[in-house]
């Protein structure tokens, strides 16, 4: 089956039926004594995931947000929705700044004695125009992919340290997407893929899909690292949801709107991936294991995955000397 036929088959017999009819109950688990952090948790899927997690009685929740005042309101929302009796901390994290990511990771590694789950959820939707961060990278590429991977690597030691304190393996969960199925990704032929994607001449049409493909790469490669032994690393498709990530897009109308889930429903998938014993490296959707797009698992696709990973490692090493120590590269 060709790629176009494969995509059409997936959309017609997988994506659309699931969006219309998939149903799954809230996750049940006892998280007593455990600590979880959720990035991008002041709104949308991240906030809904925080509410779901609070109902499972962890000892501590860390809401990682770009705006501390909005984070304070998110904390109030979680408490009002759940009567949560544990500790909620609100920490600043701006994924469009590598310095902010490093400060956040330093705070986590220095002040936390355990981290049972890191739900790396902060992200941006399709960009309306070209925009670069303070670090000189196109904003969606940095926020959704490069900074996401950097944070994942920097919290690995803390997740590893938690193994000795818990009977359950700590989780590193990355919010993915359905969009890699439709990624065009012409830059994959470039000598340096990240540099090609950071060229203003580059099309932004499938930037979101490519960035979420990179999240898949990050999750799968980290899961195979010796530094992730004993952890559960996964990436999850929360479903097509009405949330703030689509604020730059035209609101859905007519039949298209029927396909969308609420953030509360989509976040159940995130919590499932963050607390349930999935295989490490798994792709999660509808609270179950899912196969990733076939083009990403071919020999060519896996070589591409490794190339993108190696390029990101070089960027991370230039940002933080800790990366080389953690990955021992």
Image (tube, grey):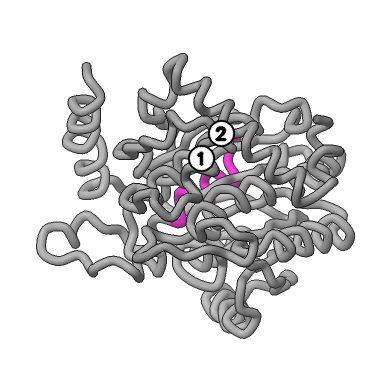
Query: Splitting the image into 4 quarters, where does residue 227 fall?
Result: top right
Q: Earlier in the sequence, mark 2 or mark 1?
A: 1
The reply to whether the magenta stretch includes residue 272 is yes
Classify mark 1: helix, strand or loop.
helix
| Placement of 47 over or under 79, stated as above or below | above
The circle on residue 308 is 2
- Tags 2 and 1 touching, CB below 8 Å: yes
Image point (55%, 60%), residue name:
122
Q: Position of residue 294 (x, y in %)?
A: 36, 23
Q: Which residue is rendered at x = 52% and y = 63% of the image? A: 132
Q: Position of residue 152 (x, y in %)?
A: 68, 46
The image quarter containing residue 171 is top right
Q: Which residue bears the numbered disc 1? A: 214
Q: Is residue 288 above or below residue 258?
A: above
Answer whether residue 90 is magenta in the image: no
In the rendered image, which quarter contains the N terminus? top left
Q: Position of residue 198 (x, y in %)?
A: 50, 50
Q: Quadrant of the C terminus?
A: top right
* Secondary element type, mark 2: helix
In-front residue for pair 114/32: 114
* Dominant SS in magenta: helix
Q: Is residue 23 above or below residue 226?
A: below
Q: Is residue 214 left or right of residue 136?
A: left
Q: Position of residue 91 (x, y in %)?
A: 71, 71
Q: How far separated are the C-alphas under marks 2 and 1?
A: 8 Å
Can I make out residue 231 in this image? yes
Badge 1 crowding class, 10 Å Cα cut-off, few under 14, some 14 to 19, many 20 or more, is many
Q: Considering depth in this image, is 5 or 253 the residue closer to the camera?
A: 5
The residue that appears at 23% across and 68% down in the rendered structure is: 250
Please tell me in which quadrant of the rendered image residue 164 appears.
top right
Give, as a single range, the part of the protein colored magenta: 267-278
């Amino acid at each position: 089956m060709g790629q176009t036929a494969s995509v059409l088959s997936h959309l017609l017999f997988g994506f659309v039926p699931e969006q219309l009819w998939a149903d799954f109950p809230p996750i049940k688990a006892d998280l007593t004594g455990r600590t979880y952090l959720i990035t991008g948790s002041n709104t949308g899927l991240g906030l809904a995931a925080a509410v779901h997690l609070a109902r499972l009685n962890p000892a501590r929740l860390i809401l990682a947000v770009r705006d501390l005042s909005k984070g304070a309101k998110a904390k109030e929302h979680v408490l009002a929705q759940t009567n949560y009796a544990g500790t909620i901390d609100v920490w600043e994290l701006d994924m469009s700044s590598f310095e902010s990511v490093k400060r956040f990771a330093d705070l986590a590694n220095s002040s936390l004695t355990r981290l049972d789950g890191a739900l790396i959820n902060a992200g941006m939707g399709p960009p309306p125009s070209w925009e670069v961060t303070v670090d000189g990278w196109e904003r969606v590429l940095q926020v959704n992919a490069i900074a996401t991977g950097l944070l994942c690597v920097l919290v690995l030691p803390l997740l590893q340290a938690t193994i000795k304190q818990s009977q359950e393996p700590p989780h590193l969960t990355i919010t993915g997407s359905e969009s890699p199925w439709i990624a065009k990704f012409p830059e994959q032929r470039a000598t340096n893929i990240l540099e090609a994607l950071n060229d203003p001449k580059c099309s932004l049409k499938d930037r979101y899909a490519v960035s979420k493909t990179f999240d898949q790469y990050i999750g799968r490669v980290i899961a195979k690292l010796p530094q992730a032994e004993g952890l559960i690393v996964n990436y999850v498709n929360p479903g097509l949801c009405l949330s703030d990530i689509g604020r730059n897009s035209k609101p859905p109308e007519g039949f298209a709107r029927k396909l969308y889930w609420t953030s509360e429903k989509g976040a159940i998938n995130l919590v499932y991936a963050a607390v349930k014993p999935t295989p490490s490296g798994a792709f999660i959707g509808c609270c179950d294991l899912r196969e990733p797009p076939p083009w990403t698992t071919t020999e060519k696709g896996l070589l591409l995955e490794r190339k993108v990973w190696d390029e990101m490692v070089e960027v991370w090493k230039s940002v933080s000397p800790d990366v080389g120590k953690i990955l021992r590269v």
